[in-house]
Amino acid sequence: MVTIVNYKERQREDGTSFHVLEIQGGIDLVMSQTTGQFYATSKRAYLSSTFNAQACEALLGTKIPGEIEKQPCEPYPYLVKETGETMILSHRWIYVPEVVADLQQQQSNKEALYMSVDSFQKTPAFEHQYTN
């Protein structure tokens, strides 16, 4: 489940504007690479919308079934506002509706099952038992 926490106005290449909804997932605990201590964070992503500012405002706090997932992309520079540091990232966070996430999980489960069946059939005991 994700929550609409904010909205922003963006500009298209032709100069017209539209609104995006900022969505946020649940709390994640992550271990700091420098201190080894855990900190709380959450994944955020943006959804394009056809809503005007008033409709976006009314949607704040709305929960939507689904999750935010990491997706690989072409590397791009990212400026950390708090520190001024520029990093090169090769991923982005995207919203995946619950129905799609369920289908992805089912596909992953099927692939794991096929892999385990394949490895079982290739064991010497199995081959000996059924090939003689």
Image: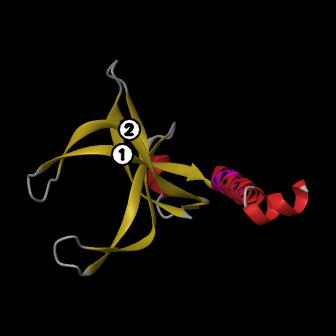
Q: Is 120 above or below relative to 31?
A: above
Dot 2: element: strand
The secondary element bearing badge 1 is classed as strand
- Label 2, on which residue? 73
Residue 58 is marked as: none
- Who's the residue at 83% across and 61% down the image? 128
- Position of 118 compared to 35: left or right? right
Where's residue 117, x and y in %? Answer: 76, 58
* On-image quarter of the N terminus: bottom right
Magenta span dominant secondary structure: helix
Q: Position of residue 11 (x, y in %)?
A: 32, 30
Q: Residue furthest left?
A: 84
Residue 127 lies left or right of residue 70; in this view the side is: right
Tally of marks: 2
Q: Which three-letter amino acid code belongs to the residue tagged 1?
A: His
Q: Which mark sits nearer the N-terminus, 2 or 1?
A: 2
Distance, label 2 to label 1, CA atoms, is: 5 Å
Q: Position of residue 9 (x, y in %)?
A: 34, 40
The residue carrying pointer 2 sits among few (fewer than 14), some (14 to 19) or many (20 or more) residues within 10 Å by Cα, namely: few
- Circle 1 residue: 91
- Position of 2 with respect to 123 (left or right) is left
Give the position of the C terminus as an image quadrant. Answer: bottom right
- Is there CB contact under 8 Å for labels 2 and 1? yes
Q: Quadrant of residue 23?
A: bottom left
> Which residue is nearer to you in this view: 72 or 110?
110
The magenta stretch is: 101-107
Image coordinates of residue 99 in percent, x first then y, are: 69, 52
Q: Residue at 54% x, 58% y: name it.
A: 67
Residue 112 is a magenta residue: no
